[in-house]
Image: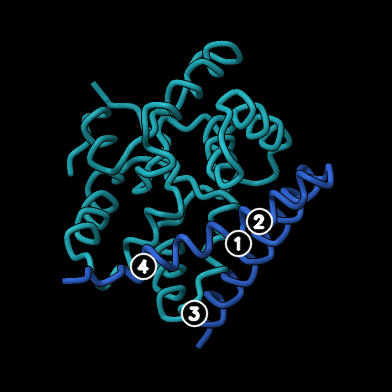
Amino acid sequence: MARTENVALRNYRHARRKVNERLLKAEKEGRLDQELRRIEREAKAWWAKEEGARSRRRAK
Amino acid sequence: MTQRRFRLYLDTSFWYRLADRQNFQMRRDSYHFLNRACVRQEILVSPLVIAEVEETPDPEERRIIERMIRKQRPERLGPQPRVGTIARTLWQEGGWGKRMLVDLTHVGYAIVCRADALVTWDSRTLARDRVRTVVQAYCRRERPDAPLIGSPEEVAKWLELRM
């Protein structure tokens, strides 16, 4: 009987592959550090958005 | 004697298991690790984890993971200039293929942020002896302590954390 593919695992591998492709492309173009700075800026924006949402929830 | 707080870098694979609707055991073990072993420890989340979570194709799964990350109030790792150099060095020293760059970048964050352990469910790429050997050799050369790299059960056992 065929095993059911684990969806969480498949999604995790998909996400990791996507980010790896992004880093590989940058590394090939000699800008890995720049790409990491960009990822760090995006994460900072993500946290800011999360905090904004939390404040709005509290204010309700 | 007060036990010191360990710094635990939770890799993306760990967060994903919290939203796993098929493998009950791994999900339960992940929750146990988070709610028992991680109590009083410092949880580290890197920008790379956020980038991977944002790539989650299933919006419901993404919401669960995001909620769990938020709930833990982890230490958010900010800009770390040496991560790229460390990842590249480990990549070259290990002689690995293309798919390992992102994994080694996670290791880079764990090293730079002085994590005691990198916790991952990914035993296919990260939690394996070859990676540990290369990381330990690099850390011996560059700094005193290498992060432990293992599954939640392994890390809980090594650091004597309740799970």
Label 1 residue SS: helix
| Residue drawn at point x = 22 percent, y = 48 percent | B36
First in sequence: mark 1 vs mark 4: 4
Asked whether the residues under marks 3 and 2 belong to the same chain, the reply is yes
Question: Dot 3, how many residues are within 10 Å of its Cα: few (below 14), some (14-19), or many (20+)?
Answer: few
Three-letter amino acid code of the residue under disc 2: Glu
Give me the disc on residue A21.
Answer: 2
**Residue tagged by mark 4?**
A8
Residue B114 pos. (x, y %): 52, 29
Q: Are marks 1 and 2 in contact (CB under 8 Å)?
A: yes
Cα–Cα span, label 3 and label 4: 31 Å
> Which residue is disc 1 drawn over?
A18
In the image, which disc is placed on residue B48? none
Chain in blue colour: A
Q: Nearer the viewer, residue B91 or A55?
A: B91
Q: Quadrant of the C terminus of chain B?
A: top left
Amino acid type at image mark 4: Ala
Q: Which numbered disc, 4 or 2, marks the residue that appears first in the sequence?
A: 4
Give how far across and how far down residue B59 sits, in percent: 47, 80
Which chain can be seen in cyan? B
Residue at 21%, 53% (x, y): give it. B29
Residue displayed at 24% across by 61% down: B27
Tell me which amino acid carries mark 1. Answer: Lys
Quickly name the residue at label 3: A58
Toward which corner of the image does residue B109 lie, by quadrant? top right
Residue in view at x 63 percent, y 66 percent: A46
